[in-house]
Amino acid sequence: MSNPLTFRWLALVSCLLGGWSVATQGADEAPDPLAVSIYEDIYADYRQFVRGRDVASIDYYGGSGARRDVIEVVLLQQALQLGGFKDSLELRDEQNYLRTLRQIADGDLISSGALVWYSDVLNLPDLFHITQPVIDEGEFIVGFYTSPTNQKALAAKSLEDLRQLRAVSSIQWYADVATLKHMGINHLYFTTDWIHMVRMVSAGRADFTLAPFQPSAGMKVVLDGMELIPIEGIKVAIQGTRHWPVSRRHPRGEEYYDALQKGITLMKERGLIHKAYEESGFFHREVDSWRLINPPAAPAAVAPSLSTSAATP
């Protein structure tokens, strides 16, 4: 059987590089100058969270609609403004992760609203500027989410217990899959998207999936009438760092990237990124005392230094 991680990487490279000449714009065509991708479900919550406010004025990151994906779109705009990039952005609905990366690579989008894993773009420095990490190694802490009726999964307390269970993920979620494999999870199923993962766990065809702890009561995931809850007392750190990718082909990509780098630095110095993730529930205080299943054996890896002129790892 072929390695799903290898297959996924080949699919990514093929999507980005295949048919390049067809995707190249003509001399008289200009890309949408400031289009940024956002997924439809995120955009609905984003509008609910922002409620018509000036994004630059937002200084509390909790409340209705707040979650990690939403807050990252807010942080993106705030970092750009702090870095001196004052133009407004058009948030363009996108449905597919690989398609989004392809459109950024082509210059149709200037960047994504969502962060991406460094491992997804590190081998494509000619296509993307890659910002400094917004989420550092070891900070992306998630739970093992299962059905409230799955007593075997709910009883899991150790890595050995988890290895007896069936996990489900997406072949496009390289970092999640790599983490599960590193943990020695052998019963691993793949499906296409998040809603199918929730359905499989809810129906008992898989025992758990990885998901960020939710800001809702009981940290529950609620989707289309289905409900998942975290296995109490244990958590895991997804391996890797997360960054914003910026198009090298977009005519304003370098200007945008330089401003974004500057803004991220300023936000980190002021503690705003940590504050935003904590207030939105991504850095969840309720799980601070929970056991980390994969504690690092050595100090957390430092992401490679990425200059403003190159994204070479």
Image (cartoon, grey):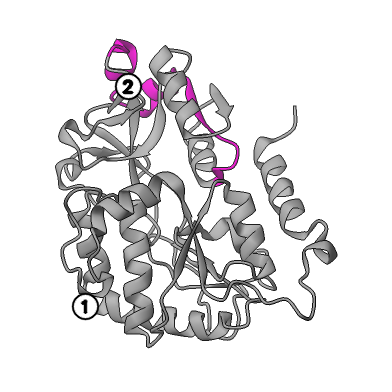
Please provide percent x and percent y for residue 141: 33, 46
What kind of residue is marked 1?
Arg
**How many neighbours does mark 1 have within 10 angstroms: few (below 14), some (14-19), or many (20 or more)?**
few
Residue at 31 percent across and 25 percent down: it is: 228
Q: Which residues are magenta?
A: 149-174
Residue at 69 percent across and 67 percent down: it is: 106
Please provide percent x and percent y for residue 84: 37, 88
Whether 299 is drawn above or below 266: the answer is above
**101 horizontally vs 83: left or right:** right
Q: Which mark is nearer the camera, 1 or 2?
A: 2
Whether 76 is drawn above or below 1: the answer is below
Q: What residue is disc 2 on?
A: 225
Residue at 40 percent across and 35 percent down: it is: 210
Foreground of the two, 59 or 139: 59
Foreground of the two, 34 or 174: 34
Residue at 34 percent across and 37 percent down: it is: 293
Q: Is residue 153 magenta?
A: yes
Please provide percent x and percent y for residue 164: 44, 17
Task: Place residue 33 in its image quadrant.
Answer: bottom right
Q: State if disc 2 and disc 1 touch (CB < 8 Å).
A: no
What kind of residue is marked 2?
Gly
Q: What residue is disc 1 on?
A: 270
Identify the secondary structure beneath mark 1: loop
Please provide percent x and percent y for residue 144: 35, 31
The disc at residue 208 is: none
Task: Place residue 5 in its image quadrant.
Answer: top right
Mark 1 or 2, nearer chain start = 2
**84 horizontally vs 31: left or right:** left
Q: Is residue 63 magenta?
A: no
Measure the C-alpha gap from mark 1 to mark 2: 40 Å
The quadrant in which the C terminus is found is bottom right
